Image (cartoon, grey):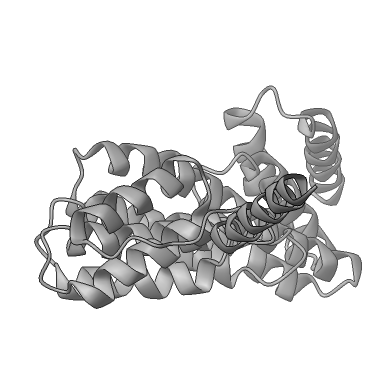
Amino acid sequence: MKTYFGRNIFLFLCYLMALSVFGCSGTVEIKTDSETGLFNEAVRYYEDKDYRMAKAAFQKLKDNYPLSKYSITAELRIADCDYHQKDYQEAIFQYEEFKKLHPTNKAIPYVMYQVGMSHFNQILSIDRDQTSTKNAAKQFEYLISRYPSDPYAISAQEKLRVCKENLAQHEYYVGYFYLKKKKFEAALFRFNGIISNFPESDLLDTVYFHIGKSYLSLEEKEKAKNILLHLLKNYPNSEYYGEAFDLLKELNENASIQE
């Protein structure tokens, strides 16, 4: 009986020891204190996508061994952990700090790309504020200009295209709102801004059509005619081609009658 009781006590103590090693979430606590041990533990957490524990391990390594050969990697991975946990503002801060401390490090193109992606992942729909879109575009443009042949700059080019199209869509959304409100000059300001700032946008045929209609509403018929002619000449497959053709035909017929 005593042996059975003693065995149960032993098992219970083993259970308590296990609880001291494993957290409530089932994640192993950081127990290692050596420089290499901390790094290996942090990497293991990171590779397992346990970014909360990975960040804690990298931070401990950075705090305890600031001159370690692993410290620069730890700084970068701390930022990456924030990024993967979608704490984008903190990630941006950490990446920017890394750039300040290590401006010539070979990882700088990656860091710049990650700053851009941190903004990119916060982009809102076209009917809302586009500050994140602008910040992402600015970061991608800087990366492309600074490291044009780097693989991350190549990836940034596609992201930049998405940013610019989003900004063009936002400007069109605002311009069309003014058009519906019969505020034609305000609409023209937005539409012309799209043509000037986003000449590669997929919206250009739509924008030209609404510029033409805005000029017609303002009785500026020659300007309307020129814009509609441009649309017909350069966008033969536009969904607005038929309507633009009819408007232009009507303008020409009215001009003939007046003559």
Report which quarter residue 179 is drawn in.
bottom right
Above or below: residue 166 compared with residue 101? above
Please indicate, yes or no, whether residue 114 appears anywhere in the rendered image. Answer: yes
**Place of residue 42 in the rendered image (x, y in percent of width and height, measured from the top left):** 36, 53
Above or below: residue 70 compared with residue 204? below
**Place of residue 62 in the rendered image (x, y in percent of width and height, measured from the top left):** 25, 71
Q: Is residue 139 left or right of residue 191?
A: left
**Place of residue 237 in the rendered image (x, y in percent of width and height, measured from the top left):** 69, 22
Instruction: Farthest residue to the right: give it.
Output: 181
Instruction: Farthest residue to the top: give it.
Output: 237
Report which quarter residue 100 is drawn in.
bottom left
The one of 149 and 190 positioned closer to us in this rendering: 149
- Name the residue located 12 percent from the left edge and 65 percent from the top edge: 68
The one of 203 and 139 positioned closer to us in this rendering: 139
Above or below: residue 248 compared with residue 36? above
Please indicate, yes or no, whether residue 225 appears anywhere in the rendered image. Answer: no
The one of 104 and 228 positioned closer to us in this rendering: 104
Q: In this view, does 18 lie to the left or right of 218?
A: left
Say how many tags the image has.
0
Q: Is residue 22 left or right of residue 41?
A: right
Above or below: residue 154 compared with residue 189? above
Report which quarter residue 17 is drawn in.
bottom right
The one of 66 and 10 positioned closer to us in this rendering: 10
- Name the residue located 56 percent from the left edge and 67 percent from the top edge: 87
**Place of residue 82 in the rendered image (x, y in percent of width and height, measured from the top left):** 48, 63
Q: In this view, does 15 lie to the left or right of 117?
A: right
- Name the residue located 66 percent from the left edge and 31 percent from the top edge: 232
- Name the residue located 14 percent from the left edge and 67 percent from the top edge: 102
